[in-house]
Image (tube, helix red, strand yellow):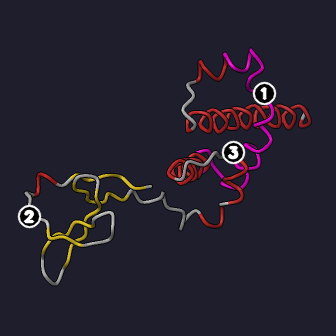
């Protein structure tokens, strides 16, 4: 009789583990912008081979110790990769595991422009200057509303 109980426990644990693995795989796809319906549809069409992701998800679960920690790690790597326009895989989480505490998304920098010419703030003179295409600095005489802020990548 004890063998049957152990077998039942083992099967129950494997079923729970598979559920946790599925949660991790599904969360990975969600971090890439795919909904569960899309994942199922793509799996049926063989665009996504779901089983290819289960082994790395199991390894990530073992490394993280819980689904919650694995999800947090995936989210952190996703934000970091997306801020740099990089693609990422579950395996990327392993590679970055020791760096997770230091992994930060790329900072979005906005720079000032006037008539498509870059501007520079002089702290000592407390004035804005417009840098012309030939490199000359001209004092900005316009209003703050005239300054356009652009995201520089």
Question: On screen, 77 above or below 10?
Answer: below
Q: Which residue is mark 1?
A: 49
Camera-nearest label, 3 or 2? 2
Of labels 3 and 2, earlier in sequence is: 3
- Which labelled disc corresponds to residue 141? 2
Of labels 3 and 1, earlier in sequence is: 1
Say left or right for 115 vs 63: left
Residue 48: where, in percent of width, then height? 74, 26
Of labels 1 and 2, earlier in sequence is: 1
Q: Which residue is mark 3?
A: 89
Camera-nearest label, 1 or 2? 2
Residue 2: where, in percent of width, then height? 89, 37
Numbered disc 1: secondary structure = loop
Quadrant for the N terminus, please: top right
Residue 149: where, in percent of width, then height? 26, 53
Q: Residue furthest bottom?
A: 124
Q: Are marks 3 and 2 in contact (CB under 8 Å)?
A: no
């Amino acid at each position: 009789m004890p063998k049957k109980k152990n077998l039942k426990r083992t099967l129950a644990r494997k079923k729970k583990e598979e559920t946790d693995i599925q949660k991790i795989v599904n969360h990975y796809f969600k971090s890439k912008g795919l909904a569960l319906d899309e994942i199922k549809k793509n799996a049926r069409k063989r665009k996504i081979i779901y089983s290819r992701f289960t082994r790395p998800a199991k390894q990530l679960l073992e490394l993280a110790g819980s689904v919650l920690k694995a999800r947090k790690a995936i989210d952190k790597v996703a934000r970091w990769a997306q801020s740099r326009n990089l693609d990422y895989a579950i395996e990327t989480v392993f590679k970055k595991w020791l760096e997770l505490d230091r992994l930060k998304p790329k900072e979005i920098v906005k720079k000032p422009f006037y008539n498509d010419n870059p501007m520079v703030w002089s702290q000592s003179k407390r004035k804005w200057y417009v840098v012309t295409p030939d490199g000359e600095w001209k004092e900005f005489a316009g209003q703050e509303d005239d300054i356009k802020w652009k995201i520089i990548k």
